[in-house]
Image (tube, rainbow, N blue to C red):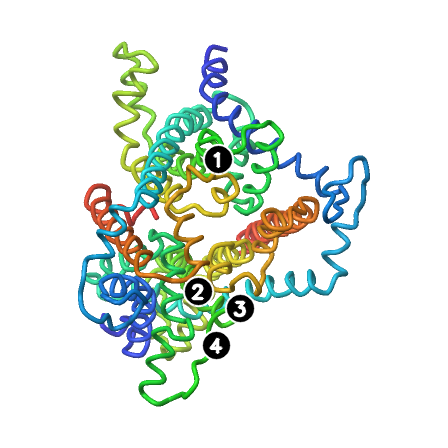
Amino acid sequence: MKSLRTGALLLSPLLFVLVAAFVVPLLLLVPTSFQEYRPGHGIVPDAWTIANYARIFTDDFYLEVVLRTLGLGVAVTFSCLLLGYPVAYLIVRGNPRWRLALTLLVIFPLMLNLVVRSFGWIVLLTNRGVVNNLLIDIGLIEKPLKLMFNMTGLMIGLTHIYLPFMVLMLVAALQNVPRDVEAAAATLGSSRLHAFRSVTLPLTAPGIISGSILVFVLTISALVTPRMLGGPTYQVMATLIYDEYMQLLDWPSGSALSFALAISTILIIWISSRMTKRWAGLA
Amino acid sequence: MNEQRPGFAVSSLALLVILFLQIPVVVVMLASFSETSYLTIPPQGWTLKWFSAVLTDRIYLSAIWNSLILAVGSTLISLVLGVAASYAIFRKMVPGSEALTSLLMAPLIIPSVVIGVALLQYFTLVGMRGSFWVLLIAHVIITVPYIVRSALASLSGLDLSVEEAARVLGAGGFTTFRLVTLPLIKPGLVAGALFSFVTSMENVPVTIFLAGPRDTTLPILIFTSVEMGVNPSVAAVSTLLIIATAIVLLVAERWTGFHRFV
């Protein structure tokens, strides 16, 4: 009994903070999301509506932003996977002497401030930025390419930002694949590519899945990079929520959109963890 | 043996990708030394004037100061609250440990923007908006999962018989924890504290909704000044952050073998 009291004493301060300043604020968003907002007047008292939610699926502008966000999530996840796998492979299977240095070079950008990294991409990608100047100087193009405020800029920036997460997940997965199974496949006459495709790749599938889920979820809720590289006009869900709260003061629409984003995130994580569990049970 | 090493094509592709990861870092650093008042790569002339401009600017200095206080404060509070809670969960002192762990980790799953707007509305309702305490509480909430995760991971590797031994030799609960348990889980906690510090230092999505005009943080300042146009002072302050991050990473690696905890 004494241990229960000690336990409660140890837990209660943090639980109090989390309930008072995290759970309750989130729950208070629910009523807001059903309220009516009139531009110029503010929130209409005692008027309840589901229009804020309906708009997400019916209004062309909202629908475009939602689809763009999801598309961006898929695209960034794939590019992180394609670029990240060779890096993870080199770290785990390459010369052990390089290992620490390479790992640190992957962690370094991860630790570095998100705003600084996005700023770096602005310097590179603007109309008179490093990339365009370089391409013009070597005569490949005459007019600067539009690399920012569109899908290209967001893809590059977000891939750069979430790639380290993917690499670290893949490194963890590859470490669990014994070298011997690849050697065995080679001994049995399988080519390197074939051995990779039929042995290594399936064995690292859990890491691929968890890395992809992580990158997807982070991408669809990203605010800083889409805002800095997409500007105020090329919107995604997070930047739209930001504008609705800070610029338009339309809190009801903003909180409905927030719920749509939060619920899709939680659903994706929940479904994928159930899938991985069932899958692990089969293996 | 050599057969199993990645081939030339894979290795060069991987090295190119690692290079890609460093490009924005290099570009920002180069830009901050340029003499021109707009950004040019390669830099024209070399100067340190943008650094002295940043380090004498009251707005930048107060933003740096605010960021540091927030990061140190929220990490310390998270450490105390998070380690205490993790210990109670680990020793199964209270029922429902799995549900409790999920609750403590929940701020990682909810998108930051959503936490930001929820806190903005809440603290406006209770009339605390614009206070520095609000920022501190918000940062505790977003950093505590990192502490809990590392504390639970370190505790799970703990040999309970050492604690028993201390108890048998007459040490009380808190003494045992302080002299036996804490030193054993310290490397994991240091890594967790670092993640917490970095998370707080770089947070925009929650902070931007809550920061009053007087207590803006460094990332918020960079974020908002970029909207008004790119300039070398931003590059200089970014370079300072890059150098600080590199030093922290190398020291942490030396100290705890940091990369194992990532």
Q: CA distance from mark 1 to mark 4?
A: 38 Å
Q: CA distance from mark 2 to mark 1?
A: 27 Å
Residue type at numbered disc 1? Ala
Secondary structure of the residue carrying numbered label 4:
loop
Question: x, y percentage for residue B5?
Answer: 27, 71
Q: Are marks 1 and 3 on the same chain?
A: no
Q: Is A204 above or below relative to B140?
A: below
Q: Which residue is mark 2?
A: A157
**Which callout, 3 or 2, points at the residue further toward the start of the chain?**
3
Secondary structure of the residue carrying numbered label 2:
helix
The numbered dot on residue B138 is 1
Which label lies toward us, 3 or 4? Answer: 4
Q: Is B191 above or below relative to A196?
A: above
Q: How many marks?
A: 4
Q: Which residue is mark 4?
A: A146
Which chain is mark 2 on? A
Residue type at numbered disc 3? Ala
Which chain is mark 4 on? A
Q: Which residue is mark 3?
A: A75
Secondary structure of the residue carrying numbered label 3:
helix
**In the rendered view, does A96 fall on the left or right side of A63?**
left
Q: CA distance from mark 3 to mark 2?
A: 12 Å
Q: CA distance from mark 1 to mark 3?
A: 32 Å
Residue type at numbered disc 2? Gly
**Which callout, 2 or 4, points at the residue further toward the start of the chain?**
4
